[in-house]
Amino acid sequence: MNLIAKRYSVLPGFGLSLGYALFWLGLIVLLPFAALALNASTLGWTAFIEQVSAPRVLASLQLSFGAALIAASVNALMGFLVAWVLVRYSFPGKRFVDALIDLPFALPTAVAGIALTTIYAPNGWLGRYLDPLGIKVAFTPLGIVVALIFVSLPFVVRTVQPVLEDLEKELEEAATCLGAGRWQIFRRVIFPAVLPALLTGSAMAFARATGEFGSVIFIAGNIPLVSEIAPLIIISKLEQFDVAGATAVAVVMLALSFFVLFLINLLQWWTARRHGMK
Amino acid sequence: MSIEIRNIEKRFGNFTALDKVSLTVESGELLALLGPSGCGKTTLLRIIAGLEQPDAGQVLFEGRDATHQHVAERQVGFVFQHYALFRHMTVFDNVAFGLTVRPRKVRPEAGEIRERVMQLLKMVQLDWLADAYPAQLSGGQRQRIALARSLAVEPRVLLLDEPFGALDAKVRKDLRRWLRKLHDDMHITSVFVTHDQEEALEVSDRVVVMDHGHIEQVGRPDDIYEQPATPFVTRFLGDVNLFHGRVEDGRFTHGDFAHALSTEAAAGNEQAVAYVRPHDLDLARARDGALAAGTVEHIHAVGPLVRVEVVPERGDAIEVVLGKERFRELALVPGEQVYVTARKLAVFSGDYAI
Amino acid sequence: MQTTESRPVRLALTALTLAFLGLFLVVPLAAVFWEALSKGWDLYAAALVEYEAWQAIKLTLIAAAIAVPLNLVFGVAAAWAIARFDFRGKSLLTTLIDLPFSVSPVVAGLMYVLLFGVNSAIGGWLAEHDIQIIFAVPGIVLATVFVTFPFVARELIPLMQAQGQEEEQAALVLGASGWQTFWRVTLPNVKWGLLYGVILTNARAMGEFGAVSVVSGHIRGETNTIPLHVEILYNEYNFVGAFACASILALLALVTLAVKTYVEWRIERQHAASLIRTQQAREALA
């Protein structure tokens, strides 16, 4: 234990706690990853490319990433607005609204899925008004975007909110003293200060949206080449005992998650290094 | 530019921050607002800046009413206690901010802005840090950048909120001297807020002592120190010994002792308190002209001054500060019985100076 | 000070926000209860007491009852090691703990199929000994543990780091043993953070769909959790049944939000109190 402990501590239990934590981490997280890695490595490069470039797979990956990107962008804008209103303005029921923001985290995705489908189906609460206008939401890619907006809604709000709260009033006062107007203060003082958090939150929303399954499959309609998402491809390949194909798609999705994770860490490291004032 | 403050009142809920405060700041002077926390000094500064609106009263700039003028139009420079530097901008961009947010018509050209910013950075001796971010600066450097930023817009008045509050003792002393010199070079009307009496007395042309939303005294630093107008000012400006007694026939009596007063004192027989600074007290072995008597309890003889604690039979311990020379001359030993004499005392009856 | 927008702007932005949240959060939530009760209370109650629904509820409770304590103990152990000691690879460990959050639930399920499925080395050995993990209850529990793995640790680590270890050191100096210190000093200090993590773990454990869906095999009355049962009923056009089961989960979500809000308020208060205490101690020293 002294081999890994960098500094002496009077507190006991280092070996026990770290050992236990590593054991469970290995069993629950690392072992399954190893299984995936092992399967992927036996796949071979050509087979992998072949699997991934199949038209149906390619379409599903495009759809998953594209819809996630649109949903994350909508949430970047609307999430920022929600955070802004919650931090800066007061209105009746604000505490309630604030608590409600986390609903997509708390509500099981399948429940969200059937609820959204019912609402946006052509005869649903909203669908019946949208349908005559030629807007079809349920069973189209648009429905997927709606579901993804729902599940990734809290990320941007919850990352931007604390930053807006911590923004010293003095900064705005200083800018006002120096002659800046409201819009200039927003554009040049507030927005740049919040931008790292906004990007982090949007990236998290994007990562979550790409992998989302439960809320999407009901509303998507799952039409091959049109509204079939990548996680569904994995499941249907698995049901056809095409383990290799499922693994290939999973590897692409995982690679993207890790890339986003890496970007988020890079962004946070960069922000902390440059602007991290003690 | 001169500033006139007329009967300013400001309340926060039930708390009265400023109660009918009037004050004139002369053109080109460096004025200190001094007082304990919660005395209203920062509120007054923020009202002058326009960051806060008074509930009643007026603020006049050069004789013109500015009470309802927007901050941005007042042309004031404000240095915040924690500097409020924009952390996502470089030092250069911070200083240039006030110029670059001007409407296009009156905005100086990029080259001109660059020149002016670099000139200011040279003035605060930090031109080599133009491309650094605030996070990379020390406290003292941030302070100077905040000052340069507020000066970039060529303000008519410079307002500083606890400018040295967040710095450690050594840096604080250097910056104090530097601010004084800067002010002497630029002669811009400046007001700063502080709770540190040493700072106020050392740096400013005039000091305004405040307490509980009132102005207690306004005056030159030496006047304030030598002739404090109220018991509060006396206590606030430094250590002081209190002697409770009476004023009668031009004398202050304390127990069995009496001290002749130089001023024409009230003839009446009044309860009074004499305030004497430790270094205005002396010790003697003779009773002549003494104000109290007691036993030498402690002698702290470190440094150029010697601190002697004398405990009288009744009442609080008396602190006496002697020079090394005088101390040697007296050859005091702990436990010895001595008399305390006062060179100078400030006597107050109630709130009145006598 | 004039550090806010004009009234019409404020009103417009607030209205826009509330409209957005109403459309995306309130309407779906209301729809669940509305649809569940659309055919009256009798059908609603009947849908819930049905055998398969009841089995699904039981399985969901079992999975949560195993996953939550496991992750609780793991979270406390990991937080103790990470927040109280310095060691090499600490940031790597923190990243690895967070890993399950960045994996699609479906991919997570797939990984377990690859690990324990009949084609794998372990799966083959297990099949020989007649132990079934995939398409059985153990697989569902494992998938649930995986997707809820980081919650408790993630809440505790920053909290314990912020609190510092002075109080524990004081306890040790006063002669307490390691366990005594843990039970009487550490745990009371982090109890609200712990509860917070447990609530989030529980909500996710009971509601997980994607990962569980892959490993369950959808055997009615045997390997269906409530979310999976909802899917089956919905696909059979039994909307009342589907929404009735969904309404239980929606209620669970509302309770989670309520408790979470309360706990957040407690943590905030505790944090404010400890800040005041530190400040007072500093002033007393100054």
Image (spheres, coloured by chain):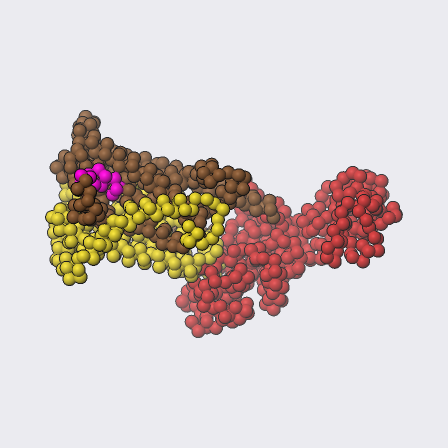
Chain colours: A yellow, B red, C brown
Q: Is residue C29 visible?
A: yes
* Residue shown at 78% from the left, 56% from the top: B323
> For the point 46% across and 42% down, which residue is it?
C271
Q: Position of residue B288 (x, y in %)?
A: 88, 47
The image quarter containing residue C55 is top left
Residue at coordinates 61% horizontally, 45% vertically from top-left? B212
* Left or right: A267 as drawn, with respect to B194: left
Tell me residue B81's x, y (percent).
Answer: 54, 55
* Count of marks overlaid on the render: 0
* Residue A97 seen in the current view: no
Image-based side of C20 in relation to B92, left or right: left
Q: Is residue B82 magenta?
A: no
Q: Please, is residue C272 above or below residue B103 in the view?
A: above
Counting from the top left corner in percent of width and height, residue C18 is at: 31, 44
Residue at 63%, 53% in the rendered image:
B196
- Report the magenta residues as a range: C130-144
Membership of C133 in magenta stretch: yes
| Vertical relation: B331 (above or below) C168 | below
Q: Position of residue A107 (x, y in %)?
A: 27, 40
Outermost residue toward the top in this view: C42
In the rendered view, does C191 fall on the left or right side of B158? left
Which of B344/A112 is in front? A112
> As drawn, is B234 to the left or to the right of A72?
right
Front residue of this view, candidates A56 and A197: A56
The residue lying toward the viewer, choosing from A167 and C267, is C267
